[in-house]
Amino acid sequence: MSVSVQVRRYGGRFDGVLFDRDGTLVRDIPYNGDPDRVEPMPGAAAAVARLREAGYRIGVVSNQSGIGRGMLDAAAVAQVNARIDELIGPFDTWQVCPHAPADACRCRKPAPGLVEAGARALGTTPAHCVVIGDIGADVDAAAAAGATGLLVPTEVTRAAEVAQAPAVVAGLADAVDWILARERLLRPPVPAAPPGGRVLAVRADSAGDVLICGPAIRALAARAGSVHLLCGPRGRAAAQLLPGVDDIIEWPVPWIDSGAGPVDPASVAALLTEVGGRGIDEAVIFTSYHQSALPLALLLRLAGVPRISAISDDFAGGLLEVRHRVPEGVPEPERALSLAAAAGYPLPDGEDGGLRINVDDLDPEPNRPGYVLVHPGASVPARACPPERCAAIVEALAGSGRDVVVTGGPDERELTAYVAGTVAQDRGGATDLAGLARLISGADALVAGNTGPAHLAAAVGTPVVSLFAPTVPFGQWGPYQVPTVRLGEQLAACRDTRAVQCPVPGHPCLSRIDPADVVAAVDALAANATLRGDAGPRGDSAPHAHPAPHADPALRGGTR
Ligand SMILES: [Zn+2]
């Protein structure tokens, strides 16, 4: 087994920046082998210089299929690269794929190989690299490696590529600004909080929402004497898995938790007593970008909490000591981390900021070929792939020779039985959240919608094939810092509607996913399993001594 400790130079977000070459650093001249024709893109040299000055290691990741097609030789490409190094660099690493598309290599973008190799050459992991490019293949390669993709479109970039990119800026100077702004969010110029306090963290809503607050809660725990987490009933199982949580208060928040019912004065009074009795020194209220922290801030004020921090665009008057604001498009885990930092609780040095859970018997041998886990359900119906399509996906995966396990909650047994059919193992309703995490940790890849298990996969380092309904932005809600291939029609009419029920007849964003694309995505990501030991967010977890889910003969028994 390979568990390594990733020591980072500071508690920032990124270590390295990997640039695409043609159309990003230099004008794209197809199959150019002539160094005299190299022409830097506007601002390229200045952008690279600024990043270098800020302490980033910098590299290039470039498809040069002209070599594989016999139109260029490698020596000519090397001469062109040397000229680019002279004009814009020097770069700390050059990663070039010489293959033609027909070679089906692992390095040609959108495959993740070049980004993985580039990150390794820079002494870091893809999770701490930005990949800057001008086409969809660049940002897709970033996602497949678990890196952050940033699109700088040119006149040849297709509108669909712009619309689907997790993040887009106009030019290379803006790209540098974007990276530095992301860092500033995590390291704001505010005094550190006094150590040893009793800190109340609040995160209502579902398990996934609680999981993606994990890094921020660890930041609180690093300075606080104790961390008390107020969550809703649907988030409690996730709260119990989070490192740094000392105490859980469960309260269904009527304006956030579905099913909480109307505001009940007796229930509110009970909450005030619970919170008041704990002698809380300060509270940090985490919310999604469309939720308000202010009603709860009022209740906590009534419970006697003297200092309260939250993100709020609305004026908060005397309700908040720290009213924090975050630009749109920041991934939710980082949005929460930035609030913790603004409250005086930055992520400590050496912490890599990834999702984590405390499950003591995760798979000890993640590198062995295993199974693919398909989780068809979703807490929000608009984000679930239709059952017939999930069944077809399971059949295709089994047909490609993979062992397939289907999971779901206790109320999804009918769904999982149908989706598993006769070709997969049905584990619907058979696990609690920790058990599901164990199953996911043993899988080569998870196939799931935008729902809790995708965030569990991020927390245990298992790659995700994300059947992502575009009702919310992928850049904010996609699986965080874990290799991901996103499928689904990102330009469907439900885009950015935050719909709970799909408003478009036929649910086209997910109902048209081609099972063959899922098989290809699993193949691309499962090859990653051999790299996960040194690249995944398992980095700082302790060695695991318990039997793996693989040891369960029911799982390994041939169901095909
Ligand atoms: Zn290649």
Image: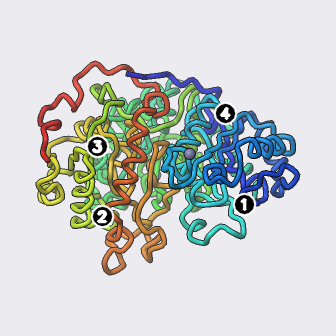
What residue type is disc 2 on? Answer: Cys
Quarter of the image that includes the N terminus? top left
**Residue at 41% from the left image edge and 61% from the top image edge:** 487
What residue type is disc 4 on? Answer: Pro
Question: In this figure, which residue is indicated by the disc labeled 3?
Answer: 236
Question: In this figure, which residue is indicated by the disc labeled 4?
Answer: 191
Q: Residue 67 at what x, y percent from top left?
A: 65, 49
Nearest-to-viewer mark from 1 and 3: 1
What residue type is disc 3 on? Answer: Arg
Is residue 274 visible to the viewer in this orientation of the structure?
A: no
Nearest-to-viewer mark from 3 and 2: 2
* N-terminal-most mark, 1 or 3: 1
Disc 4 to disc 2: CB gap under 8 Å: no
**Residue at 50% from the left image edge and 46% from the top image edge:** 105
Question: In this figure, which residue is indicated by the disc labeled 1?
Answer: 30
Q: Mark 3 near ligand 1 (CB under 8 Å)?
A: no
CA distance for labels 4 and 1: 52 Å
The answer to whether 336 appears left or right of 182 in the picture is left
Disc 3 to disc 4: CB gap under 8 Å: no
Residue 10 sits in quarter: top right
Disc 3 to disc 2: CB gap under 8 Å: no
